[in-house]
Image (cartoon, grey):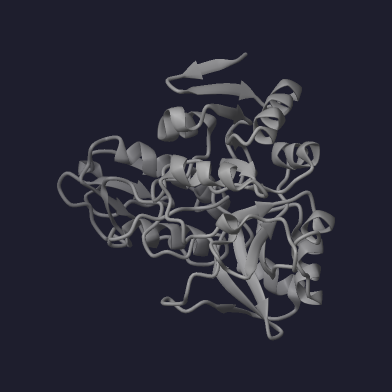
Amino acid sequence: MNTTTPGSRILPAGDAALSAARDALAAGEIVAIPTETVYGLAADATNGEAVARIFAAKQRPSFNPLICHVTGIEMAESFAAFDPLSRRLAEAFWPGALTLVLPLKPGHAIHPLVTAGLDTVAVRAPKGFGAELIATLGRPLAAPSANRSGKISATTARAVADSLGEAAPLVIDGGPTPVGVESTIVKVEDGAIFLLRPGGVAAEAIEAAAGMPLRRAEANAAIQAPGMLASHYAPAARMRLNAGHVAPGEALLAYGPERIAGAETAKAVLVLSETGDLVEAAAKLFDYMGRLDATGAECIAVEPIPATGLGEAINDRLARAAAPRTIESGEDA
């Protein structure tokens, strides 16, 4: 059944939604779609006016590049060049939550707004509805996360509509996203693999497939891919990480079976995973940050979360949410 919220029409994923989304994209409009990572705000990556609508809707800085979503290696090769190691990673993890930063080919059709003036492009092949839509449209989609830039990424269709309102006239509801954090972004350079953004594919899995360790991007590295600005994913409330106690008036984002001192006095408590399951925690992260922010607490205390596996991506998002908010920022699916 179709639903309408102020400014947004929500269609359940299916044949009717696929047709409506394809027609809107072909006409140069933007559509919020489900992916396995987070919801994306999609536009035809070859249409500059359409891509500009993404930036306008998200109020996103134009110097932060977008990810191109494709059906697979064949489509990606129409505009990007694969080295052998990047191809191996694509074969191992596509479709899925891995984004590769690749050199652009001469004469490519990707609009410059997508790459923010870089000579590389971030590419991934999503699963599910997104893959079907790209195949039906026959062109790659630029699709950052479907939320106001710098705010919490949306993992449900309702969260998209609440964040973007009339800026997202069509939202496709595919249910809660199973991964819950954005894709991992890597770049192969000089025979080494650099982790530009941790995400839905754990670093250890990439290292196992590549047969070599990942190198981490320096904290002050130039922007090479989406998600590299310092302040991202920020609620209105301040974030206090690795908290050992709850201060008066704070809300608590908890993890694991045991609570920190003062938890019983928190304005609200949400537990990412009672059992310490990082996959469960990742899937709930943005939703729970948003719920705690909605309590009106001035600060959200966050219990320590392990930095292994998907914990690296969770801690990366939390650190960006807690960073000084001197620059508006954006995120990608």
Q: Which x, y percent locates residue 151? A: 39, 46
- Is residue 81 in sight in this rendering? yes
Residue 3 lies in quadrant: top right
Q: Residue furthest left?
A: 248
Residue 38 showing in the rendered view: no
Please tell me which residue is depicted at 35% across the width and 55% down the height of the picture. Answer: 328
Query: Residue 260: x, y in percent?
Result: 29, 54
Q: Tally the numbered discs.
A: 0
Extreme residue toward the top, this view: 1
Where 3 sits versus 33, above or below?
above
Q: On the picture, is 250 further left or further right than 231? A: left
Give the image quarter of residue 289.
top left
Please name whichever residue, 300 or 252, is drawn nearer the observer in this view of the structure: 300
**Taking 96 as reference, is 222 above or below it?**
below
Quadrant in the picture for the N terminus: top right
Question: What residue is rendered at 28% in x and 45% in y?
Answer: 236
Residue drawn at point x = 36 percent, y = 56 percent = 321
Question: Which of the 4 image quarters holds residue 49?
Answer: top right
| Horizontal relation, residue 194 to residue 147: left or right | right
x%, y% of residue 158?
49, 28
On the image, the x and y values in percent for residue 144 come to: 55, 49
Farthest-out residue, bottom: 190
